[in-house]
Amino acid sequence: MLKLLIPVLGTKGATEAARHGAFLFSERCVSEVEVIEVLDELAEGRVSAFHSRAELRRAEKERTRDALMQTCAILDDAGVPYTWKRVFGPPERTIATYAARDRADIVVLDASQLGFFHRWTVLARLWRLSTTPVTMLH
């Protein structure tokens, strides 16, 4: 049985990855699912000159909360047991680190909300950084 890692990137969530995970669980291919909400480190840019880091972090959490809730709702409806955690850092490196540390067997990434170039950039970085197989859904 496999341990599946589903990263939630951005405000669109990982609904396709959650659906795929629910399907794999119903087929008895997956025993554990871990959902990680990946929040990028706040950049030192113009916006940080006008707003505090706490305000920026709070706004980012609010934007991603709905996406995370949709992803978790799909898993709940399918009866899939999962764990959830929020992590901070550069997305590709953070996903690769958590996949290795938590001994995930596969990473299922929902790239439906990413643009064409960004999708392939993320996938190339993940393939380079991760020893865990990565499946990208779009």
Image (cartoon, grey):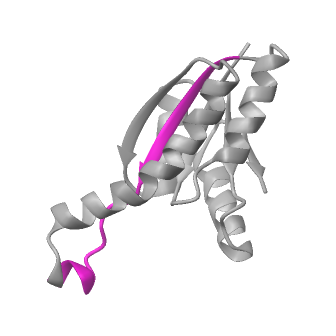
Quadrant housing residue 85: top left
The residue sitting at 66% across, 18% down in the picture is 79
Q: Which quarter shows the C terminus?
A: bottom right
Locate residue 78 relative to residue 89 in the image: left or right.
Answer: right
Residue 98 visible in the snapshot: yes
Give the vertical position of 26 relative to 100 (above or below): above
Q: Nearer the viewer, residue 5 or 105?
A: 5
The residue closer to the viewer here, 2 or 75, is: 75
Judged from this view, the residue extending furthest toward the bottom is 46
Q: Is residue 118 left or right of residue 35?
A: right
Query: Residue 1 at x, y = what percent?
Result: 74, 12
Determine the residue positioned at 46% across, 44% down: 37
Range shown magenta: 31-49
Q: Position of residue 125 (x, y in %)?
A: 61, 59
Image point 73% across, 46% down: which residue? 16
- Residue 22 drawn in magenta: no
**Residue 97 percent across, percent down from the top left:** 47, 40
Does the stretch in magenta take in 39?
yes
| Location of residue 45 in the rendering, given as x and y in whole percent from the top left corner | 27, 82
Q: Quadrant of residue 133?
A: top right
Please identify the residue farthest to the right as the structure is shown. Answer: 27
For the point 26% across and 58% down, the residue is 58
Taking the image as shown, residue 100 lies to the left or right of residue 59, namely right
As displayed, is residue 94 above or below residue 51? Answer: above
